[in-house]
Image: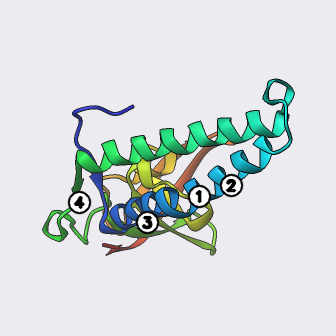
Amino acid sequence: MVENKEIVLTKDGMAKLREELEYLKTEKRKEVSEKIKEARSFGDLSENAEYDEAKNEQAEVESRINTIVNMLKYARVIDDSEIANDTVGLGVTVVIREVGEDDEETYAIVTTTETDPVNNKISQDSPVGSALMGHKVGDTVTVDSPAGKIDFEIVSITKNV
């Protein structure tokens, strides 16, 4: 659990955390409560797998709620004025192209908390993110990947906050 440490988030990241917290507190708690209630109706709790599973889920939900509450307590949203649109950093969307290739890839650079590779949101601490940090349009950066070193050219940078 994060304690007394500033958590830097984008506006989108802050909104998503608040949305998740609201969902967990309202809908998910009720859903888990219903599962526990239903499992209790099956009788003997000492050998009731459904009850144990529901109680474990309840513990996970409460743990996640506590984690989010603590994160929000120490969260700071990146101010738009802190984001440069000419250098790769938190809060930008960057378009890159592997040197010698035509296909472009677009990534939003976000904090570790907001990472979502499926939606092309990568952490500034990821191999690609950390290689890109601080670079400008036209720069070529080398990324260490499991397949070896890959060179990427930065095509464009825009603010995503």
Q: Mark 4 points at which residue?
A: 77
- Mark 4, Cα crowd under 10 Å, few <14 / some 14-19 / many 20+, is some
Quick one: label 1, few (<14), some, or many (20+) residues within 10 Å?
Answer: few
Sooner in the amino-acid sequence: mark 2 or mark 3: 3
- Select label 4 or label 1 by which is in front: 1
Question: For numbered disc 3, what is the local secondary structure?
Answer: helix
- The amino acid sitting under disc 3 is Glu
Disc 3 target residue: 19
Q: Is mark 2 on a helix, strand or loop?
A: helix
**Callout 1 touching callout 2 (CB < 8 Å):** yes
* Total labels drawn: 4
Q: Nearer the viewer, mark 4 or mark 2?
A: 2
In the image, which disc is placed on residue 30? 1
Of badges 1 and 3, the one in the foreground is 1
Would you call the spot at circle 3 few (<14 residues within 10 Å), some (14-19), or many (20 or more)? few
Q: In this view, does 44 lie to the left or right of 59?
A: right
Above or below, 29 relative to 146 = below
- Residue 149 x/y as whole percent: 59, 43
Look at the image and tell me in which quarter the C terminus lies.
bottom left
Q: Name the residue under label 2.
A: 34
Q: Is residue 108 left or right of residue 32?
A: left
Could you give the CA–CA distance between mark 3 and mark 4, rounded to whole angstroms? 15 Å
The vertical placement of 32 against 2, above or below, is below
Q: Quadrant of the N terminus?
A: top left
Tell me the CA gap for discs 4 and 2. Answer: 36 Å
Marked residue nearer the N-terminal end (1 or 3): 3
Please say if 58 is above or below 138: above
